[in-house]
Amino acid sequence: MTNNYAVLIAGVGGMGAMSTSNVLKEYGIQNPNIVQVRASESRGVSQREGSVYACVKYVLSEKMTNESNEIPKPPGHNIVLSPHPRVQSVDVLLAIEPLEFLRNLHFLKTDGVAVINNQKNVPKSCITSKEASYPEMQKKITQVKALLPDLKIISNNYTRAALAKFNLSIMANVLMLNTLPEIDPRIFDPKSFTQIVDSLNM
């Protein structure tokens, strides 16, 4: 297990990508096993229903990552130099809109995990233009699985589930966040993670 762990949240403006990032940042700050937290955000087109993303990176403590037979690491090995995502550097991608999964797939490690909200938010360009069309997502996901067999994909209509549970579609990101303790309970302690989510009144 490496010392760095990255989560990328991708969506469109108004879907809660930034508030989801805030939860992950706060969790990292409060978790004693996470020694550094770095984050970056893309907000430029958020008010126009454009694509937005937020990346949160953790540096994990030695006791979480070191094995007894591991060769000692040199000084400075656990420093996050940039908060921005690099190609194939992200462990988990939370795609709050399915098209954002395709747009940001190149950031995800080949053995990473993608959590996809399969509720479409069709861009205006697909509505107003005869030349633009929304891709057939299930077909695309099948193609991705064939190309990246080690990639784990969790796909669900979290918007519909949020409406049923909270009567608020914006709470889809909370349900997506709750998949993280299942993905990696060593990093995301279920009890403390839920407390962080509740304390920020998402």
Image: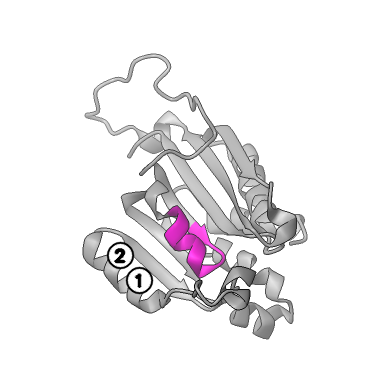
Q: Nearer the viewer, residue 25 or 191?
A: 25
Find the distance from the CA under tag 1 to the CA under tag 2. 6 Å
Q: Are marks 1 and 2 in contact (CB under 8 Å)?
A: yes
Residue 88, x across and y down, in percent: 36, 44
- The quadrant of the rendering that contains the C terminus is bottom right
Q: For residue 101: magenta?
A: yes
Reply above or below: 67 against 125: above
Residue 40 location, x and y as percent?
Answer: 60, 39
Q: Which residue is mark 1?
A: 140
Q: Is residue 133 shown to the viewer in this render?
A: yes
x 53%, y 79%: residue: 157
Q: Which residue is mark 2?
A: 144
150 left or right of 181 in image: left
Q: Can I make out residue 182 in this image?
A: no
Span of residues in magenta: 94-104
Q: Going 49% across and 27% down the picture, which residue do you hit?
A: 80
Residue at image point 61% right, 77% down? 127
In the image as oriented, which residue stretches furthest toward the top? 75
How far from the left and from the top, in percent, is residue 112? 35, 53
Q: Secondary structure at mark 2?
A: helix
